[in-house]
Amino acid sequence: MLLAMLVGLPAAVGGALLAAGHRADRAAAPLAVATAAAAVALGAVAAAARPHVSVPMLAGIPAELAVDGLSAVMVVVIPAIVLAVVLFSVGDMGEDPSRARFHGLLLVFASAMLATVTATGILPLLAGWEVMGAASYALIGFWWTDRDRVRSATLAFLTTRTADLGLYLAAGAALAGGAAALELTALAGLGGGWRDAAVAGAIVAALGKSAQLPFSFWLSRAMAGPSPVSALLHSATMVAAGGYLLLRLHPALEAVAWAGPTVAWVGLLTAVVLAAVALAQEDLKQLLAASTCSQIGFVVLAAGAGAVSGGTVQFAAHAAVKGLLFLVAGAWLAALGARRLPDLRGAARRYPLLGWLFTIGALAVGGAPPLSVWVAKDQILTMALSESPALYAVGSAAAALSAAYAAKALFTVWMRPAAGTADPGRGRAPARLSPAFVLPLPFLAAAAVGLAAVAIPPIATWWRRLLDATDEHSPYVWETAVSAALSVGVIAAVGAVVAWSLQRRMKAAAVPRTAAAWAADWFGAERIAIGAAAAPTMALARGLAAFDDRVVAGTVRAAAAAADAASRLTDARLEASLARAVGAVARGARTLGRWTRRPQTGLLHQYYAQAVVALIVLAAVLVLMR
C-alpha cells in the first residue's frame, strides 16, 4: 500500500490536473507542491520500511515493485528533487496560462521515474520507462506553438526511443532464455546467448536514456524546455535513469565478460569528450547539459567497474548539484533574461545569494574537496584503478576537465562586466525574484555539501552495507590527495586564465577557434547521427513508401481494375445469358407445376376415373411389352 501510494499519488494528481486543463490552473501549483511534499514523506518511510507490492500483469508475469538498498536511496532523492523543482516552478511558471498542464506532466513524469527505480521486473520497468519518455517529450515541447522547441522535443524523443528498442530486445531475450517472470535479477542466470542479448539490449537502452556516447546530442536539444524541466531531466530523473539501470544490473554485467569493460569505457569516454564540450560552451545551460553527460558518465563507469557504492553517491550528489546549478541558471535567466556566459558577467555580484549558491554547486561539480562529487569520484576511481590503471588515468583526466569547465563558469559570473559593454541592469536595483525561486536552493546546496559525509568511515561502512556492496573499499589517502590537488590546481589555473582573458576582452578558451567551435557544436554529433542513421533511415523509408505506392499499391489497383472489368464483362455477357437460362428453367418449372396441380381437383369420383384410366394405360403397356 505504501509503495502504491508513493508511485500512484503523483500519477493520480498529475492525471487529474491534465484532465481538468485550464480549470485547474489556479490550484495546480499548490496541489503539485503538496503532492511532491507528500511524496518526500512517503519516500522516506518507504526507504525505512522496504515495502513490496505485486499485482498480476500477464499470465505468470506479475508487476512487482519493491524497495531494496539501492532503490531506498532513489525513493528519497527523486521526490526531494521533484519538490525543489516544483517549488522553483511556482515562481518560474507563475503566469503561464497552462500551469495545470505543466504541473500535471511534471507529476506524471515523477511517478514514472519512481516506478522505474522500484521495478523488479522488465515489464514494469518498461512501463515506467515508456511513460517517462512520453512525458519528457511533452515537457521539452511544452511551448508547442514554437516549432523549434517542438522540433527539439521530437529529436530528443526519437533518439531515446531508438535506444529504448534495446529494452524490448532484453525482454524478448529474457523470456526466450527462461526468465519466466522477467525478473531483473534473473538476467545474470540466463543461459547461452540469451544472456548476452539481454544484457546488450539493456546497455543500449541505458546509454540512450543517459545521453552517453553516441546518443549524447539529444541532451543539447532538451534545453529547449522550461528551466524547471531542464533541472528535473538533468538531475535525478530521465538522464540519471540509465545510470541507475546499469547499477541495478551490475550482477548481469559481471556475468558477461565483455559487458563490464564496455560499459566502463563508454562512460569514461563520455566523461572526457562531453567535459571538453562543456568547456567550449558560451551558453550556461548548454555547458550544464554537456556537464550532465560527463558526470553521468562517472555513474556508468562505476557500473562497469563494480563501484556500486561510489556510483550511487555520484547519482545522489549529482542530482543535488545539477539541480542547484540549473535552478540558479533559471533564476538568472528569469531576472536578467540572459543565459550566455558573456551576458552573465557580474550576475553573481548582482545576486549575491544566488552567486554563493552557484559557487557551491560549481565547486562541487568541479570535484573540489571536501564536497560530495569529489568523494563520489574518488570512490569510483579507486575501484576503476583495481580494474585497470588506464581507467584510472583517463578518469582523472575527465575529473580535471570537469574542474576546468566549472572554473570557467564560476569565474565568469563573478567577474565585473567589462567597461563600455552593454549592461541593461547597470544603474538600477536588481529585479526582485520571487521567494519561490530561492527557497529550494539552500537545501540543494546543503545536500551537495552534506553528502560528502559518506566518506567518513562509519558512515561509509553503513552505506556499503545498505547497498550490499561490502566488497568495495574506500580510496587510499594518496588517491584523495592527488584528486584534491588536481581539482584545486585546475580550478585555480583556469580561473586565473579566465579572469586574465576577460579583463583583456579575449576569449577565455586557450584552444584554436576552430577546435573550440567544433567542441561547442558537440563535435557535430547531431549532424553525424542524422547523416549516419536518420538520413539513411529516411531514404530507406521513402524508397519503401515509393515501392509501396508504385508496386504494392499499383498491383492492388491493377487487380481491382481487372476484377472490375471482369465483373462488367460478366454482367454484360455471361450474366445476361445465365439470367435467361435461369428464367427459362423457372418458367418450365412453373408450367410443370401447373400441369401437376390439374389432376388435384379434390373430387373423389374424378380420382377414381383417373385411377381407372391409369390402370388401363398400365395394362395396355404390359400387354404391349409381352
Image (cartoon, rainbow, N blue to C red):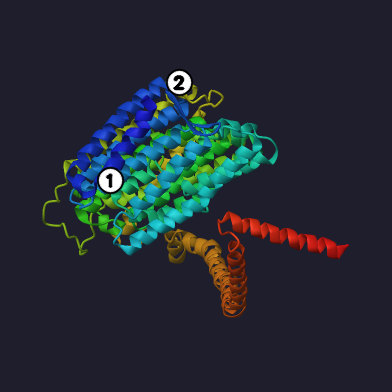
Which tag, 1 or 2, sits closer to the chain's start? 1
Q: 66 or 583: which is nearer to us? A: 583
For the point 56% across and 75% down, the residue is 564
- The image quarter in which residue 323 lies: top left
How packed is label 2: few (under 14 Cα within 10 Å), some, or many (20 or more)? few
Q: Which image quarter is the C terminus in?
A: bottom right
* Percent x, y of residue 261: 61, 41
Name the mark on residue 463: none
Q: 587 or 311: which is nearer to us? A: 587
Name the mark on residue 462: 2
* Percent x, y of residue 121: 52, 34
Please, which residue is most extreme toward the left here?
428
Q: Secondary structure at mark 1?
A: helix
For the point 46% across and 41% down, the residue is 127
Dot 1 amino acid type: Ala
* Percent x, y of residue 492: 37, 46
For the point 66% across and 40% down, the residue is 194
How packed is label 1: few (under 14 Cα within 10 Å), some, or many (20 or more)? some
Task: Classify residue 26 as left or right of residue 444.
Answer: left
Q: Which image quarter is the N terminus in?
A: top left
* Percent x, y of residue 361: 33, 41
Q: Which residue is mark 1?
A: 19
For the point 33% across and 45% down, the residue is 231
Q: What is the CA distance from the residue labelled 1 to the residue labelled 2?
A: 45 Å
